[in-house]
């Protein structure tokens, strides 16, 4: 078993703890690399533990010795020779290394987890699995019966393809949706399915039957004669993806939200799932402003922009104005959806917008500019997405001289109906011949 942790700066006071570790180790710990004032980079390279060594929990466990099922987490701690305070330090260091997050964790929390009084939320379960090099089942944090495709024990962005012991007929669809989303495709060939999913789908044909055209997963999935599986409606894929991501947002975990850019329809579903959860909204706001990657920031902005809350919309627009990378991704997504053009082409157009104030006008033919003006004259009034409305203001501002009447009518309509102060400021700046990004 390997235990790894690293701190660059800022997390709790000390790791590794002073003095020798005790416990059934088969090898030494490669300890501190360097210390330097308030910045103390280090890495605990490895902690080799004899997984078969006696646990030794005095006075606890069922008759006959050995830990009870709810003491497995404590057993791993003892095997590693760590105190509860040292577990706190290690988890905080892992969180800082991966996500630059400060976690509020103390020995009392770890004690409750180890005694089964409280179950750690998903973010902490993921870190505990990384710390001990074990799955949630091995740590006693989740029953093997509850293992599903939408919540893999590793906590990574990829689904654990080996954790399908408890597959049910309804559990293939979430896995397929997630795989399609990561691959940016609307279908999967039979050869691209995990062995367990393929087996489950074939079982729905009857014993010993191969993949064949038909309806699967209670009508959610269809297979054509070439062996390509897809959803009966594209929104089903968006629903399963949104369900999975919003579940970990509620736990304060953003690793899936940073995996790939979400779609407009996925964001609309997620906002319904997070709008009644204040902590989720707070986390999304923080990630939108301070997220480590542009994908995380723009995905957070995309969900918040669809909540329909004026103050939140203003925050989103301010973030898009100040963050060029996030703005470029948001523009790309809006162009891709509204104009129904490939993602690469939409990205190129968004890049032209960022080059200079006339970049979009200069790269479009007059007929294309008129088409764009008409499409975004409608999008500027989209009640579902404040970010798309602001992007429409920005795009229309660049083709104002090519389609002056259409653009003017659209901006005046926005003045009458818009509730976001930041969007109204941008509309006013365009009418005053200024850039909507500057105001």
Image: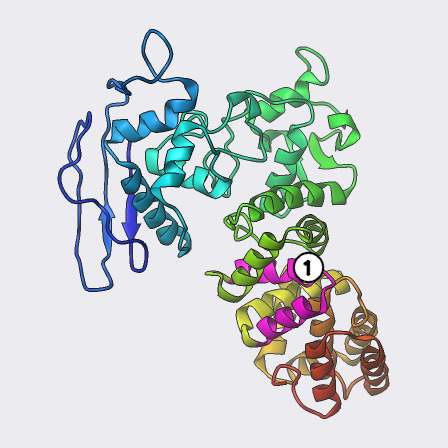
Residue for point 77% across, 61% down: 384
Place of residue 205 in the rendered image (x, y in percent of width and height, measured from the top left): 73, 17
- In the rendered view, tell whether residue 333 sits above or below residue 357: above
Q: In the image, is residue 275 part of the stretch drawn in magenta?
A: no
- Snapshot quadrant of residue 177: top right
The count of marks equals 1
Whether residue 171 sits left or right of residue 43 in the image: it is right
- Snapshot quadrant of residue 314: bottom right
Q: Which residues lie in the magenta part? A: 294-321
Residue for point 62% across, 48% down: 184
Q: In the image, is residue 307 part of the stretch drawn in magenta?
A: yes
Q: Predominant secondary structure in magenta?
A: helix
For numbered disc 1, what is the local secondary structure? loop
- In the rendered view, tell whether residue 401 sits above or below residue 310: below
Mark 1 nearby-residue class (10 Å; few <14, some 14–19, many ≥20): few
- Residue that numbered label 1 is attached to: 342
């Amino acid at each position: 078993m390997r235990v790894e942790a690293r701190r660059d700066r800022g997390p709790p006071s000390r790791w590794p703890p002073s003095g020798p570790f005790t416990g059934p180790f088969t090898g030494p710990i490669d300890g501190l690399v360097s210390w330097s004032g308030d910045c103390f980079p280090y890495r605990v390279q490895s902690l080799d533990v004899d997984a078969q060594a006696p646990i030794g929990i005095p006075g606890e466990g069922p008759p006959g010795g050995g830990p009870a099922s709810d003491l497995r987490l404590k057993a791993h701690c003892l095997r590693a020779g760590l105190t509860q305070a040292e577990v706190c330090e290690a988890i905080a260091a892992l969180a800082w290394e991966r996500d630059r997050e400060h976690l509020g964790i103390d020995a009392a929390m770890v004690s409750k987890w180890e005694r089964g009084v409280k179950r750690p939320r998903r973010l902490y379960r993921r870190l505990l699995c990384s710390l001990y090099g074990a799955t949630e089942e091995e740590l006693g944090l989740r029953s093997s019966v509850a293992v599903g495709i939408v919540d893999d024990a590793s906590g990574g962005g990829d689904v654990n393809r080996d954790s399908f012991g408890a597959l049910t007929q309804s559990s293939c669809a979430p896995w397929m949706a997630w795989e399609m989303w990561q691959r940016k495709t609307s279908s999967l060939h039979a050869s691209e399915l995990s062995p367990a999913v393929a087996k489950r789908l074939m079982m729905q044909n009857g014993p010993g039957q191969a993949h064949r055209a038909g309806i699967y997963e209670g009508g959610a999935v269809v297979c054509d004669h070439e062996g390509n599986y897809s959803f009966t409606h594209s929104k089903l894929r968006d629903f399963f993806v949104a369900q999975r991501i919003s579940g970990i947002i509620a736990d304060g975990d953003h690793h899936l939200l940073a995996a790939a850019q979400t779609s407009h329809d996925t964001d609309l579903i997620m906002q319904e799932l997070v709008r009644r959860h204040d902590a989720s909204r707070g986390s999304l706001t923080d990630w939108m402003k301070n997220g480590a990657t542009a994908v995380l920031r723009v995905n957070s902005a995309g969900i918040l922009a669809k909540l329909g809350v004026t103050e939140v919309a203003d925050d989103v627009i301010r973030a898009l104005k100040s963050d060029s990378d996030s703005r470029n991704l948001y523009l790309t997504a809006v162009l891709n959806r509204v104009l129904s053009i490939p993602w690469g082409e939409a990205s190129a157009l968004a890049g032209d917008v960022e080059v200079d104030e006339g970049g979009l006008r200069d790269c479009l033919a007059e007929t294309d500019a008129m088409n764009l003006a008409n499409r975004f004259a409608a999008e500027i009034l989209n009640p579902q997405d404040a970010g798309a409305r602001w992007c429409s203001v920005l795009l229309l501002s660049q083709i104002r001289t090519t389609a002056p009447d259409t653009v003017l009518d659209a901006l005046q309509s926005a003045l009458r109906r818009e509730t976001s102060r930041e969007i109204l400021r941008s509309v006013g700046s365009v009418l005053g011949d200024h850039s909507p990004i500057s105001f």
